[in-house]
Amino acid sequence: MDVISFLEEHMLSCQWKQMGVECMGCGMQRSLIYLLKGDFIAAFYMYPAIYSLIGMFVYLGFHLKFAFKNGPKILLFLFVSNVLIMLTNYILKFY
């Protein structure tokens, strides 16, 4: 069994969706699976913040390793940007 099939069969269920509430993280798992399959456009449409989140975590890893001078400010900017992207996507789901 390959990794993608395993992930597709063992996706976590969203507790918010089970209660009938939309959640800001819904679509992230499916988006990661699309990325692993190489379908980059579908990954973006499934969860628009996927690329900025990956970029933020990559930068975080480098910052933890090399302790960049302005690292905390850049990480704060990246974090706020990701939250804004997620909120915008969340709001647009209703319209």
Image (cartoon, rainbow, N blue to C red):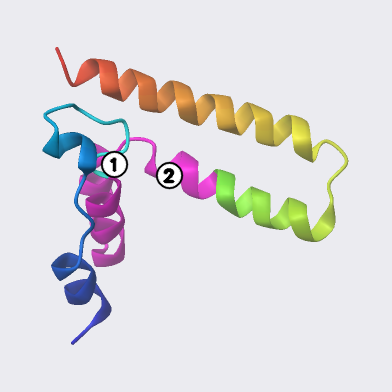
Residue at 49% x, 49% y is 54
Q: Which residue is mark 1?
A: 44
Q: What kind of residue is marked 2? A: Tyr
Residue reaching furthest front? 19
Drawn side of residue 89 relative to residue 1, left or right? right
The residues bearing labels 2 and 1 have C-alpha atoms spaced at a distance of 8 Å
Relative to 19, does residue 9 appear above or below in the rendering?
A: below
Residue 39 horizontal/vertical position (percent): 23, 56
Q: Are marks 2 and 1 in contact (CB under 8 Å)?
A: yes
Drawn side of residue 63 relative to residue 52, left or right? right
Snapshot quadrant of residue 27: top left
Badge 2 element: helix
Q: Which residues are magenta?
A: 28-55
Relative to 59, does residue 72 appear above or below in the rendering?
A: above
As rendered, which of 39 and 16 lies closer to the eye? 16
Residue 43 horizontal/vertical position (percent): 26, 48
As rendered, which of 39 and 34 lies closer to the eye? 34
- Mark 1 Cα-neighbour bin, 10 Å: few <14, some 14–19, many ≥20: some
Residue 31 horizontal/vertical position (percent): 27, 50
Badge 1 element: helix
Q: Which residue is mark 2?
A: 51
Q: Main secondary structure of the magenta part?
A: helix
Q: Is residue 52 magenta?
A: yes
Q: What kind of residue is marked 1? A: Phe
Residue at 53% x, 26% y is 81
Relative to 66, does residue 51 appear above or below in the rendering?
A: above
Q: Which mark is residue 55?
A: none
